[in-house]
Every structure is written in structure tokens, then in C-alpha cells.
């Protein structure tokens, strides 16, 4: 068969929960080519931050994404606190971590349901979303909201965790652990589930590195990277946990990594609750943040989230830039789908746990900029420039660090 | 003449099948929902859905061939109803018995599938085209095992008419021999009804609604109705061939036994829907030809040996 058909998956399609476009060129049932287009969900949040005081920015950034709302607000606040040179009280750091892990639990359970739906396994969708209600109710109990918890304030948190709430958390974690064990059993024993997921959306360790895959997507290809471990923030230095990796390199591996991460999250929460120190909840931070810039990293459920902040000494940021994990992962989707089956397109897209509302930015490509050769840098030049910059400004020598991958 | 007309239009023809198919849909959906820990729809939901769809605007795509586009849902409905008239339900006789009616019913049940394929083809939308390809590929996967499985009991009875098959098994327990073929028939019936794990032709996360993507309003309602009626007709066919008992003198009791039989078969279909994830089309082909067809062949071999024995 030589005739090719182009199937538009998106911008509106039942497989996608948010608008994005994947034009799949099919040869029979095989994927011959795929064209990824994002940008249907641009809301101008970065620009919106520039005109607002820092506290308002926290509220705005919490609404970047409906799932990892805590991730974005914490990441931004970490950048602000770095510029303002504030050290938050220990209890606040612990509470931020607890919320971060609860958010990871609800995000991963949500993903499990979505992935099951993409392969037509609606029973698992219903089960995992039913169990997700346990953690959603818990979040509503702790913060008053199911999705936008708004626990962060600059300099700490606004909401304490009382003794009764501690018990509630532990009880909920016990229930969830029980259920997660069941899902691990399903994931390792259910034949049609394994058949549909293994050897689908394969991406090797080298390719995953080269395309910059982060979070569970990268870890399922054996890249042992986790900001919680590599560059600990909040209270992650105080707890013991493993960075889950897997060498399946396919969608099945990504499912296994996420389910096992759930088990780690339960253990982290238990340790944090046990050690929760008795300190104040927040310190006062002046309204005007001194001039400076900072980059903060945060391990969101979907991968590494990066926020860049440039302040100018007023109460409003000069520039806020965020790089959501989906932007790092979406590049690898085209590679994963090479020579794949059309039936696997939805699950491969879903396997990176895409969040397009986090990702979409407006990009203006100015012709002047593109034509000016001297403004362009190759990868090598950029690397040298950054090594020089760190040597000069921070006194750190990065030149000895080996380039990863090829 | 009047009696024949009543038989075709009211009982056990059009109207009875229509009501039974709606009840069947409710029962199937409720079972599926309860097994998934959901509430499930209220009893009138299938009726409400049908009426709602009938009242919706009918949109025919500009590229589609309007005449064929409109005729196909009716072809699907009519061929299903015709198939139903030839299946013995609660007496050992159908309305119009003749030698070879098992084959006839199987062919009448293939027609709706072909009309789905044509519907996708004439819709001229990319999703429907992929759906058409999948409907036909899937047809080649399940049709042969289904035929072999349904005909295996008939081979043992040395007849291709329902009446003789039923009277052959009579009140003996010989029908238990056909359990493997029954399993194959149930699995392939699921493929024919295009439900999970064989809902490949209308996999909503891949090709939206497959061949039915461009169908709206009344025409879609008729397709859905055809699908629901196909569930009942398929279950009745399997019940008549594999459970040839319960045809006593008390008509009411026979009727209840018939309902129990199809309720059991629909339960098995719903259970399968709950337990599995959707297969890929290549996995479906491999599964049907590598596992189902040999089992059906084995059953035929067993039946031939038993026949030589007696």
C-alpha cells in the first residue's frame, strides 16, 4: 500500500485532554511521519507576572497547571527566596515537601487512569480515579482546596498541619499504599495491559539524554536524575528515598516507574510526618525584592520544572520565565513514535504525561535576529560561554564535567 | 397473512427485538458500570438516548454520497432483524425454518458489519477511512473462527438447520462437549460487536468513533440500534446452538429460560469488556488465527470423532 493518509490527532481529539496537534501520516497502520504542534493553550502568564506584585504572581503561577499547581508556585517562590536571601523555617520546608508528595501521588494516579483509558482499559481508569479521591479529599481537608492548595507564601507556608491532620494523612497513606500494591500486581500480571504497553514508544538511554527527557520519561530510560536528590530543596535532604529507574525504555517502563514512585512518595510522607519539627511557619519578607536573578529547579510529578526570575528592586518581577517538564519531554515523542503503530500514538503521547497548559508559550522569531549570524551560537560555543560565565561570576569551574551521552 | 405480519412486525420481530435490545443495552451498561464501581445509568437511559438522537439535527458531510450514507443504517437494522426471525427462541422451531438456516443467520449477521465498513468508506473522513480498514481487517480475523465454532455442534448433529440440531441434542447432556467452541464463539462474538478488547474499529482515543465519526442524529441512532440488536441476535444464536435445552411444553417457562440464557451470555460479554485492555489490530489478528481458530478446529475434530463413535 503506497497511499498515505494524514490523520489529525488534535487540536480537538478524544485522546487529548488539552489542545495540541499531532498530524500523523499513516501508511496502513504504521506511522510514517508525525508533526507536533503546540501553542493552542497560550495564556500569557509570564507576561502577566511582570505587572503584578510577587504575592499575586504566586497565585497566578499556581494556576499554570491544574495538576502540578504546587510545583509551579513552590518553584517560583524558591527563586524569589533565593534573590531575597531568605531562609524559610524548617517546618515550612517540611510542609512544602508533604504537599509536593501528595501532589505527586494524585498526579501519578491520574496518569495511571488516563493511560488505561488510552489503551481502552476503562476499568483501571475507574479504579485508579476512585482511589485518587482519597488523596484529593485529603488535600481538600489540609488546604481547603482539591487542586489549587495555595499553601505557599513568600517566606514559608500559610497553613499548619495539626496532630489530627497528621493522623488523617497517615491513615490515607495506608489505604493508598494498599491500593498501589494492587496496581503493581495489575501492572506486572495483567496480560493485555503488558501486551499493549511493552515495546511501545521505545526511546534508548542515549536518545533520551540527547532529547533532554526529564522526570519519569527519562528515568524509565535509565537516566538517574531527580532534582529532589541532585539538588535538594525544601526538606528532601532530611529523608531517605530511592530514585526509581527502569531499563525497559518503553511505555511499560514509564508506567512501572510511576507506580513505584508512588510507593516512594508514601515512605517520604511517613518520614516527613514523623520528623515534622516545631518551628514557626513563615518569616517576614519585605515587599520589595532586591535586584538580582535566580533559577530554581523543582521535581514536579512530570519532571524537572525550572523557573527563572529577574527582579529589579521593586515589588514586581522584571521577568519570569518557566520551563515546564512537558516542553523538555515533547521533543522525544516524535522519536518514540518512529515506525510505531497508529494504535500506539495516543498512549505514547500520554506516556510523557503531557501538560500543554504548562508548556505553551508565544515565540516571536524576529527576522533580524535570525539573519544576524553573530547573534547565533552553536551548542559548543554556548557551553564554553557558560563555563566562562560561571568561572568569572560564581567562581565554579565546570570545565571538568564530562558531556553526557555521545 | 395477518399472523405473519404480526410475527414480523411485533412478536418476535421488529418491536419485540427493539424493546429487548434496549433492555439488553441497559443490562449490559449497568453490569459494566457496577463491575467498575460506578452507579450506572437509570433504566430508561437507552430509550432516552434513542429518542434524543432521533430528535437531533442530521448532518451529511459534503463529500459523502448522501443516498448510500442514509441507506446504510437501515441495511444494518433490517439484516439484523431478518437474522432474528430465523433463530429458534423459545420453541425448537423458528418462524421460517429451512435446512441451512444456521448458515443463513451467520451471513445475515455479516451484513451489518459490511454496512459499517461501507458507512466509513462513504463518509470520506480520515478517521472513518481508518475505521473501515480496521472493520474489514477485524472481520477477516474473527469471522472464520466464529463460523467454525458455531458450526461445530451442527457437525455433531449432522445437520445445518436449527430444528434438527436442537432435536438431536434433545434432553441429553451431549451439548457439554461443545464448551470449547462456546468459548470461541463468545470471544469472536465480542469481536463482531466491536466491544473491548476488540473495539479496535471504533477506538475512541485513536480514531474518535471510527466508521461512525461522521454519523449524527437519527442515522447514528439506527446504527446504535443495529449494534444493540446485534448483541441480542448474536446472543440468541449462541444460545440456540450451544444451549439446546429448555424447549418444553410450557411456553412461559421456555421464555424465561431464553431470557436467562441471553442474560448469561451478555454477562460474559460485559465481563470480558471489564477485564481487558483494547488489543492492537495486529495482536487481534494473531490472537484469532493462532489461538481461536485452532481451538475451533480441535472442537470440530472432537465432534467428528464422537460422531464416528456413536
Image (spheres, coloured by chain):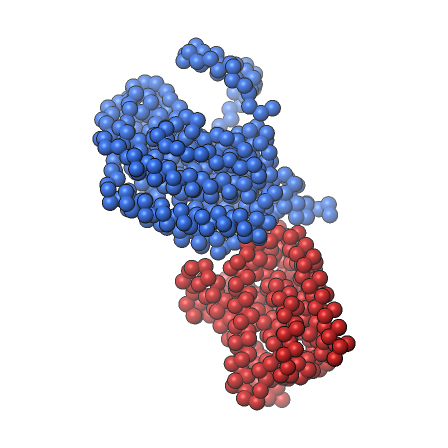
Residue closest to the eye, A368 or B99: B99
Quadrant in the picture for residue A305: top left
Tell me residue A24's x, y (percent): 61, 43
Q: Quadrant of residue A345?
A: top right
Q: Which chain is blue?
A: A
Residue at (57, 66) in percent of width and height: B227
Please indicate, yes or no, whether residue B244 appears anywhere in the rendered image: yes
* Residue located 37% across and 22% down the image: A294
Quadrant position of the C terminus of chain B in the picture: bottom right
Furthest-top residue in this view:
A392
Q: Is residue A343 above or below residue A34?
A: below
User: Looking at this rendering, what residue extends furthest in the right direction?
Assistant: B308
Which sits in the foreground, A66 or A12?
A66
* Left or right: A41, with B102 as reference point: left
Where in the figure is residue B251, as x and y percent of width and height? 54, 87
Chain B pictured colour: red
Residue reaching furthest to the front:
B309
Front position in the image: A360 or B181 = B181
Q: Position of residue A210 (x, y in %)?
A: 57, 28
The correct choice, above or below, for B309 with respect to A161 in the image is below
- Residue displayed at 67% across by 59% down: B291
Q: Number of callouts in the render? A: 0
The residue shown at (28%, 24%) is A87
Residue A106 located left or right of residue B271: left
Can the viewer see residue A65 in this picture?
A: no
Task: Say above or below: B36 vs B174.
Answer: above
- Quadrant location of the N terminus of chain B in the rendered image: bottom right
- Residue A11 locus on image (x, y percent): 51, 44
Amino acid at each position: 500500500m503506497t497511499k498515505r493518509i494524514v490523520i489529525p490527532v488534535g487540536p480537538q481529539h478524544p485522546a487529548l485532554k488539552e489542545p495540541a496537534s499531532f498530524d500523523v501520516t499513516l501508511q496502513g497502520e504504521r506511522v510514517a511521519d508525525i508533526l507536533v504542534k503546540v501553542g493552542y493553550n497560550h495564556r500569557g502568564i509570564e507576561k502577566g507576572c511582570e505587572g503584578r506584585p510577587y504575592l499575586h504572581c504566586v497565585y497566578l503561577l499556581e494556576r499554570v497547571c491544574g495538576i502540578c499547581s504546587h510545583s509551579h508556585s513552590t518553584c517560583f517562590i524558591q527563586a524569589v527566596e533565593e534573590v531575597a536571601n531568605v531562609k524559610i523555617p524548617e517546618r515550612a520546608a517540611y510542609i512544602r515537601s508533604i504537599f509536593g508528595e501528595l501532589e505527586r501521588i494524585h498526579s501519578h494516579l491520574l496518569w495511571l487512569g488516563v493511560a488505561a483509558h488510552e489503551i481502552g482499559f476503562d476499568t483501571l481508569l475507574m479504579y485508579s480515579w476512585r482511589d485518587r479521591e482519597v488523596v484529593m479529599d485529603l488535600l481538600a481537608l489540609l488546604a481547603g482546596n482539591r487542586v489549587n492548595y495555595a499553601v505557599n507564601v513568600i517566606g514559608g507556608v500559610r497553613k499548619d498541619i495539626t496532630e489530627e491532620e497528621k493522623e488523617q494523612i497517615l491513615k490515607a497513606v495506608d489505604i493508598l499504599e494498599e491500593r498501589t500494591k494492587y496496581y503493581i500486581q495489575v501492572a506486572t500480571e495483567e496480560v493485555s495491559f503488558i501486551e499493549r504497553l511493552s515495546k511501545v514508544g521505545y526511546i534508548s538511554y542515549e536518545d533520551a539524554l540527547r532529547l533532554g527527557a526529564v522526570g519519569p520519561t527519562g528515568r524509565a530510560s535509565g537516566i538517574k536524575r531527580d532534582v529532589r536528590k541532585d539538588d535538594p530543596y525544601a526538606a528532601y535532604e532530611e529523608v531517605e528515598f530511592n530514585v526509581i529507574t527502569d531499563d525497559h525504555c518503553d511505555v511499560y517502563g514509564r508506567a512501572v516507574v510511576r507506580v513505584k514512585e508512588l510507593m516512594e512518595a508514601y515512605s517520604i510522607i511517613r518520614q516527613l510526618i514523623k520528623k515534622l519539627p516545631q518551628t514557626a511557619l513563615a518569616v517576614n519578607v519585605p515587599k520589595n525584592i532586591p535586584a538580582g536573578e535566580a533559577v530554581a529547579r523543582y521535581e514536579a510529578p512530570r519532571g524537572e520544572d525550572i523557573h527563572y526570575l529577574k527582579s529589579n528592586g521593586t515589588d514586581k518581577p522584571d521577568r519570569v520565565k518557566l520551563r515546564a517538564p512537558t516542553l523538555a519531554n515533547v521533543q522525544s515523542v516524535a522519536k518514540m513514535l518512529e515506525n510505531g503503530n497508529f494504535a500506539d500514538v495516543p498512549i505514547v503521547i500520554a506516556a510523557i504525561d503531557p501538560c500543554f497548559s504548562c508548556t505553551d508559550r508565544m515565540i516571536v522569531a524576529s527576522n533580524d535576529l535570525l539573519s544576524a549570524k553573530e547573534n547565533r551560537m552553536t551548542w559548543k560555543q554556548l557551553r564554553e560561554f557558560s563555563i566562562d560565565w560561571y568561572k568569572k561570576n560564581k567562581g565554579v569551574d565546570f570545565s571538568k564535567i564530562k558531556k553526557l551521552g555521545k | 397473512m395477518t399472523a405473519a405480519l404480526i410475527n414480523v412486525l411485533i412478536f418476535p420481530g421488529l418491536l419485540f427485538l427493539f424493546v429487548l435490545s434496549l433492555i439488553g443495552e441497559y443490562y449490559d451498561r449497568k453490569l459494566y458500570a457496577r463491575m467498575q464501581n460506578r452507579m450506572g445509568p437509570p433504566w430508561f437511559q437507552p430509550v432516552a438516548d434513542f429518542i434524543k438522537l432521533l430528535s437531533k439535527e442530521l448532518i451529511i458531510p459534503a463529500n459523502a454520497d448522501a443516498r448510500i450514507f442514509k441507506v446504510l443504517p437501515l441495511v444494518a437494522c433490517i439484516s439484523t432483524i431478518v437474522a432474528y426471525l430465523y433463530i429458534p427462541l423459545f420453541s425448537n422451531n423458528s418462524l421460517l425454518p429451512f435446512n441451512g438456516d444456521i448458515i443463513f443467520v451467520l451471513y445475515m449477521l455479516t451484513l451489518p458489519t459490511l454496512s459499517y465498513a461501507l458507512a466509513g468508506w462513504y463518509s470520506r473522513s480520515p478517521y472513518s477511512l481508518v475505521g473501515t480498514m480496521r472493520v474489514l481487517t477485524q472481520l477477516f480475523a474473527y469471522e472464520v473462527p466464529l463460523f467454525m465454532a458455531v458450526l461445530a455442534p451442527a457437525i455433531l448433529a449432522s445437520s445445518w438447520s436449527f430444528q434438527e440440531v436442537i432435536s438431536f441434542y434433545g434432553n441429553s447432556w451431549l451439548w457439554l462437549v461443545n464448551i470449547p467452541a462456546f468459548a470461541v464463539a463468545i470471544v469472536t462474538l465480542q469481536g463482531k460487536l466491536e466491544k473491548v478488547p476488540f473495539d479496535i474499529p471504533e477506538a475512541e482515543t485513536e480514531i474518535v468513533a471510527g466508521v461512525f465519526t461522521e454519523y449524527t442524529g437519527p442515522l447514528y441512532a439506527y446504527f446504535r440500534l443495529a449494534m444493540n440488536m446485534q448483541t441480542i441476535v448474536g446472543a440468541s444464536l449462541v444460545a440456540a446452538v450451544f444451549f439446546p435445552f429448555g424447549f418444553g411444553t410450557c411456553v412461559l417457562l421456555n421464555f424465561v429460560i431464553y431470557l436467562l440464557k441471553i442474560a448469561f451470555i451478555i454477562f460474559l460479554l460485559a465481563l470480558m469488556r471489564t477485564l481487558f485492555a483494547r488489543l492492537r489490530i495486529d495482536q487481534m489478528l494473531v490472537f484469532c488465527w493462532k489461538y481461536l481458530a485452532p481451538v475451533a478446529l480441535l472442537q470440530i475434530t472432537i465432534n467428528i470423532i464422537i460422531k464416528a463413535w456413536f
